Amino acid sequence: MKKRFACIWIFFHAAVISAFLISLAFSPEINFATSLFDILPPSSSLHEVQSADAALASKTGRAVTVLAKGETFEKAKFKAAEFYSHYVDSENRLNADYFDSLSLYVNSNSVAEITYWLFKNRYNLIDDETCELLENGGAEEVAEEALASVYGAFSFSDLSVLEEDPFLLTERSLKRFLEGGALSSTSMSLHDEVLAAQKDGLWYVLIRGVISEKGAALTGKNSTVRNIYSFCDKDQFVFSGVPFHSYESSASAQTQISVISTISLILIIVTFLFIFRSFMPAFISALAVVFSCGIGFISVLLFFRGIHVLTFVFGTTLIGTCLDYSIHYFVNWKGNSLCRTGEDVRNHIFRGITLGFVSTEICFAALFFAPFPLLKQVSVFLFMGLLASYLTVIAVYPLLKNPELKGIAVPKLINFQNNKKTLCRYKKFVPFVLVIFSVSVILINYRSFGIKNNIKELYSMSDQMLQNEIMSAKVLNTGSSGWYFIVKADSEEELLQKNEELAEFLNSAVNEKKLGNYLSVVQFIPSQKKQRKSYLASEKLLPLAESQFEVIGFGNNSDNYENNYRSLEHGYITPSDSDIPASIKEAVSNLWIGKIGDKFYSCVLPLHASADEEIYFREYASKNEGIFFVNKVKDISAQLDVLSKTMLLMLLFAFIVVIIVLCFCYRLNLVIKIAAIPFMVTVITTAVLFLCRINLSFFPITALVLIFGLGLDYIIYMVEGIKNKAGKTENLNNFAIVLSFFTTALSFGALAFSSFAPVHMLGLTVFAGLSAAVLSAFCLTED
């Protein structure tokens, strides 16, 4: 028997580890996700454009804004230049380990580059006002305005190209680009080759960048945010962008989880040493936990090629369950005089831990069917880790030599034989009072009863990060509304035309004061249809070319002008052109998603929009094919509501399956009593959440699934213990249950002190639920 169990243990571990090592040969890259945003499910309303939204998030999710501040402009610019030179060397080479792009200077070369590009495409990029003027017979007005600019005190255009652009079409386009604010998308203005603004007596200089994929790592030496924080004095800079929030949330969560878990583990080990008076149970149990977590970890990597940090948070459930098995084994190993060998101990606890194992695995397996990658990871981690732990207890532990001296001093409070009369008197009264109290709390708060998810509640900024965002919003005045449009089409040209249709709608919204401004790729690169319209409108200037050249002193150059015009007839520009100026390409890249599969996608960002007008914009998108309105906060919160309801259905399904299994093991009246307990646990836990002002949302509901899996173990252990009327043995069983609860509650109770909302909710819910479950288990004690 020993050899058979040992062979099963060896085969299981060897199979999992070998499969993982083989997978590394074919797919060596592993992704460790730590961002809060990585755990959020995709919006259900974005099913058609989910891949495009993910691609957009990967771009914007790595974009950062840094403001260098100082009492004077010179000081602010010096700090900004110091920051810039830290990542860009003297030969203007960017450190690709940290950034894909980084911009500070808007020098004459940048303007010249834009001007030359506009000059090359001057016939195709005429603004709407000029185009309409030309189409309605206003060519003479355009010519006169050009002459006024040429002979005026200041000209915005490069007069060296007058021989080819006598109507200053380039100047008109350049004014639209620079005065319209599309290139900076902020209220900042150009000062000494940098974008700067003054606010509340301080100067701010703008630095914008996109963090590289390698630098986006939130841990390790290549973390860009970590490098920025180590290099910069936080009091001299203002930081804004998703990477800073991701770093803050994940760093805080990882630190708290590490500290809390370490302290909990130390307390558990000390408890083991105190109770068993031996180092071996503590050491073996800790080793079993490490093995189980290791198997769970590599199983997740094997299935998903990556793992999220919150998978480890949920994985703390595994630690408690593994220790439960170890405790039940070592309590009988040390205290049960009837168990003379390891096989005796295994035989004594085998039925109890096997039924507990099966019921818990059913609950963990149910998580795998949730349409949510994080829960699938959690399911695999817990399922495989628990299987490893179970096999370790029944296959490896019996190989340990039993102690010669048996005996554990069971505390009087847990000695059920001595307290039987008292317990019989109050065992039904206590849970009844708790249920009545809990129902009363729920009824008092009935208006807030229901599934409510709000992703804003999952993360609260630190005071410094909050001040950074407030100041950044004041200085930049970008007016981001938090929602946007995704546009989908079958071709690049169709996509640009759809963007132009949307732009017309947004222009009307601006005129109606429902919107301040917006950003769209067609503000930089129009569709070929519109470029063609612009080109044909420019033809109205050909009859005036001869007189225009004469007035500005170039003689009769009209033939060359017309030949040049005709040669550019099909010179259309597209968002994918390689000669687009860097500053325009940067602006376009944030909006142009490009081709994914057989479709093309882009993004349009409304600015300075009132939240009250959201329905107005959402309705427009719903009525126009290929245009999708996205409000990530609302949409994902709604999707979490759907997932929460799905989790409740899975919990019900797991409950039914477990009850069916128990029907084959216990008599019907006992199964009915066991079946009633999860309802009591759910009611009490829900009341605790209300008292703590926590909504019945995704993380507490997921915790209920874990509670159901863990709580049934206590009930099954108690039922198995009730069968044994051997006095001391029953007391040992009760003591093992209390000790199991203590170690698990210690782990989760400590997590409840975390400031990271998902961890806090998980810890508090599991602690409250398990407390109710263990109380329920002891109430099963027979008279």
Image (cartoon, rainbow, N blue to C red):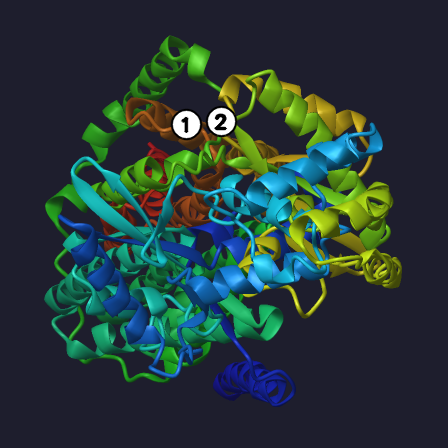
Residue 430 picture location, percent across and down: 28, 23
Q: Quarter of the image containing the C terminus? A: top left
Position of residue 447 relative to residue 625, above or below, is above
> Observer-nearest residue: 349 or 478?
478
Residue 582 visible, this orientation: yes
* Left or right side of 358 for 544: right
Residues under numbered marks 2 and 1 in contact, where contact means CB atoms less than 8 Å apart: yes
> Observer-nearest residue: 297 or 600?
600
Residue 116's image quarter?
A: bottom right
Residue 690 picture location, percent across and down: 35, 23
Q: In the rendered image, which residue does mark 1 sit on?
A: 695
Residue 668 visible, this orientation: no
- SS assignment at label 1: loop
Amino acid beneath label 2: Lys
Position of residue 315 relative to residue 539, above or below, is below
The residue located at (60%, 50%) in the rendering is 372
Q: In the rendered image, which residue does mark 2 sit on?
A: 452
Specify few, some or many for label 1: CA neighbours under 10 Å numbering under 14, 14-19, or 20 or more: many
The residue located at (21%, 63%) in the rendering is 78
> Observer-nearest residue: 509 or 771?
509
The residue located at (15%, 50%) in the rendering is 72
